[in-house]
Image: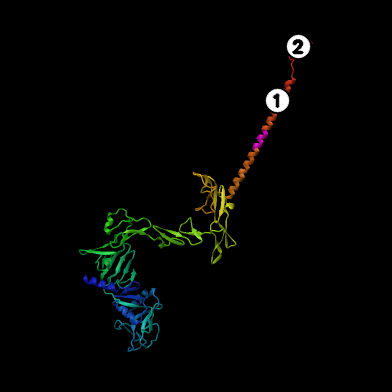
Amino acid sequence: MRNIILTAMALSLLGVDGENIGDCVEGKCFVFHPESLSFDAARIACQEKAGDLITVKTEKTADVLAGILKAASGHFWLGLRRYSSDECSDSGLRGYTWVTGPQTNHYSNWRNDHTVCAPLCVSMSQDDLKWHERHCEEKIDGFLCEIGNPQFCQPLKSNEGVLYSTPLGFTSRNNIQEIPQFTNATVFPLRTKHICVEADFWLQAPWSCEVFNGGCDYKCQSEKQTYSCICLPGFKLDDNKISCSRLEVEPGLVLKSSSDTESIKNPKCKPGFRYENNVCVDEDECGIAPCEHECANTEGSYECVCFKGYTRSTEDMHKCKMQCFEFNCTAECDSNNNAQCNCPDGFILENDRFCVDLDECISTNYCDEGCTNTPGSYECLCAKGFVSTDDGGCEREDVEGSGNFDTFTPTSVSPTATRASISAGSLMGITICVVVCLLLLVCFSHFIKRRLSKTHQYDIHKGHEEIYNFQQVITDDTFPESDQRL
């Protein structure tokens, strides 16, 4: 086991930055390195990684190289070279020799049918995968290394896929045929980790802390030949026993180790903060570019800032809209389409290039009393002792005012928005109805007045008539003494 640990540590030192491409087949691994080097420098680089420049002796190896070079471009050194003492030939390897040993194969893939009898080296082109003869001192686009892989493991099985990180400096997801020894494999979706210890023997993490940190995300600890993973303060160990997830902790709460989290009830930071180094620090929300124009980070939050000539939209705080402080402004037009121009709210487009203020006090007066037009908006005015309401009306204020008028400047309502959902036609209809009702009321009043006048004249005439009739009727009993004398 000690030898395995030392070998793994040595291979980890030989590994490169993981930007290479590779595959393994037939007990060998082939790795593409995108470094511009001469033939000799490229060979030394491969030897430093316990390998040599690649030998292409079978069609199967050629097919593997074709798959590796799909994501590459240019020309790459192969391990094929001809020295000045070598004989020239137009068949087979044409007098070239593989740097790895005896020439027992007859496979070749030359681009040209004839050869140049000179000390040259061979490269492969990604465009046609053919072999090209060129001077060995040239620095071309990269090179291909061949490294022995006797103790390989078979690929792991998972419906969600496996990510392999090899000690040879390349990673692959499900595309390696023979997994190199000491490769780390992350199996999804649980993200468990395994290591290829030797031929067809996978060991699940955590393993020895001396080998790739035991497979732990943060830190591996050992106690009596038992290995376990621990997390930073403020993080907890996941169910796979190797990865860590952040805990949300109240500001000021300090954790000494991951085991202390068991005594915390519902730990969390305030919105806009994250737990880091035992404290809650501000989260810079501007990093995700939430604003249409510019973003200013604030403590626990952020604020969207608009460019000059714009103001923040009241409907969506993340967006900006045009703003004009004059009654006439230049329109904002599409540089590719002059017919597509925009004006700020409360303005109308004239002459296809200019924005002219719409006088809301004339076109649609929403104020019950006074109204003052402003660029792109309006203000409602009320008499002394009254204040404006959101709908443009006036109401008596609780405390006596100090001026002749109180002004109201709408801020959250578009100047072209109406106070009520009544159209101009409806208002006209209501006005006509009121006028008709007033006319009917006047006619009815006039009729009643005339009727009362006629009734009064009739009563007077009738009274006079009754008096007249009363005076003309004389009975025999009126003058009794006169009748007796006669």
Disc 1 residue crowd, few under 14, some 14–19, many 20+, Cα 10 Å: few
Q: Residue furthest right?
A: 486
Q: Is residue 133 visible?
A: yes
Say above or below: 3 vs 399: below
Closer-to-camera residue (357/9): 357
Determine if the magenta segment contains residue 266: no
Secondary structure, mark 2, is helix
Q: Main secondary structure of the magenta part?
A: helix
Tell me which amino acid carries mark 2.
Glu
Which residue matches tag 2? 481
Determine if the magenta segment contains residue 446: yes
Which residue matches tag 1? 463
Whole-percent x, y for residue 33 in the image: 35, 76
| C-alpha gap between disc 2 and disc 1 | 32 Å
Closer-to-camera residue (167/442): 442
Q: Is residue 56 visible?
A: no
Residue 354 location, quadrant? bottom right
Closer-to-camera residue (127/251): 251
Picture residue at 58% right of the left edge, 50% below the top: 424
Tell me which amino acid carries mark 1.
Gly
Residue range (magenta)? 444-451
Residue 59 location, quadrant? bottom left
Left/right of residue 395 with respect to residue 454 in the rendered view: left
Q: Residue furthest left?
A: 224
The C terminus sits in image quarter: top right
Whole-percent x, y for residue 333 in the image: 54, 64
Q: Residue furthest top?
A: 485
Say above or below: 463 vs 478: below
